[in-house]
Amino acid sequence: MEKNNSPKPIRCKAISPSGADSVVESLGEGVKEMAVGDAVVPTFLSNCGDCKGCRSEKSNFCSTVPFTVMPGMPRDGTNRFTDAAGRPLNNFFGVSSFCEYTVVDVAQVTKVDAALSPEKACLLSCGVATGKCG
């Protein structure tokens, strides 16, 4: 499968202080996997849903949007944030889930039922690793 380097950003608003449960606020060009208002949780391991790793029953390592600790959006390295002086700010682990708002690649969120409580939704995100749920 050919790697897709076109950015697919979505803007999310955190519902809980940990950002473990968020809602899609806006969609970037070409995003068809989500809709505005969808309940989502951020995940630093991407899932494009199309590559061999994402379709495998034995792996969850996406080869289209692989995990890296690099600045910028995972598909193209562009940046969506700046500080007051205009210097670029980077997403922490690609998701910045402790922010009130963040911009992430669509492959780095998982759609969940809106009725799912933050205490349970965080288990799909970074709640276990950080101890911050709800």
Image (spheres, rainbow, N blue to C red):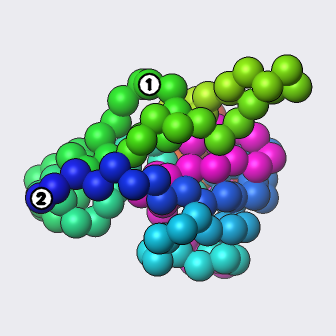
Q: Is residue 40 left or right of residue 89?
A: left
116 relative to 108 in the view: left or right: right
Q: Amino acid at mark 1?
A: Met
Say which of 33 and 53 sits in front: 33
Instruction: Name the residue at the right extreme.
Output: 84
**Callout 2: few (<14), some (14-19), or many (20+) C-alpha neighbours within 10 Å?**
few
Q: From what the image shows, is residue 111 above or below residue 76?
A: below
Can residue 129 be seen here?
Answer: no
Q: Position of residue 121 (x, y in %)?
A: 58, 59
Q: Nearer the viewer, residue 86 or 42?
A: 86
Q: Earlier in the sequence, mark 2 or mark 1?
A: 2
Q: Is residue 3 magenta?
A: no
Which structural element holds mark 2?
A: loop
Q: Is residue 47 at least partly visible in the picture?
A: yes
Number of callouts in the render? 2
Q: Over which residues does the magenta segment extend?
A: 95-119
Q: Could you say whether the residue bearing mark 1 is in a helix, strand or loop?
A: loop
**Measuring 79% from the left and 25% from the top, which residue is drawn there?**
86
Image position, residue 42 (x, y; %): 55, 51
Screen quadrant of the N terminus: bottom left
- Left or right of residue 109: residue 16: right
Identity, as a three-letter code, of the amino acid under mark 2: Met
The disc at residue 1 is: 2
**Residue 79 disc label:** none
121 w.r.t. 127: above or below: below
Q: Nearer the viewer, residue 62 or 127?
A: 62
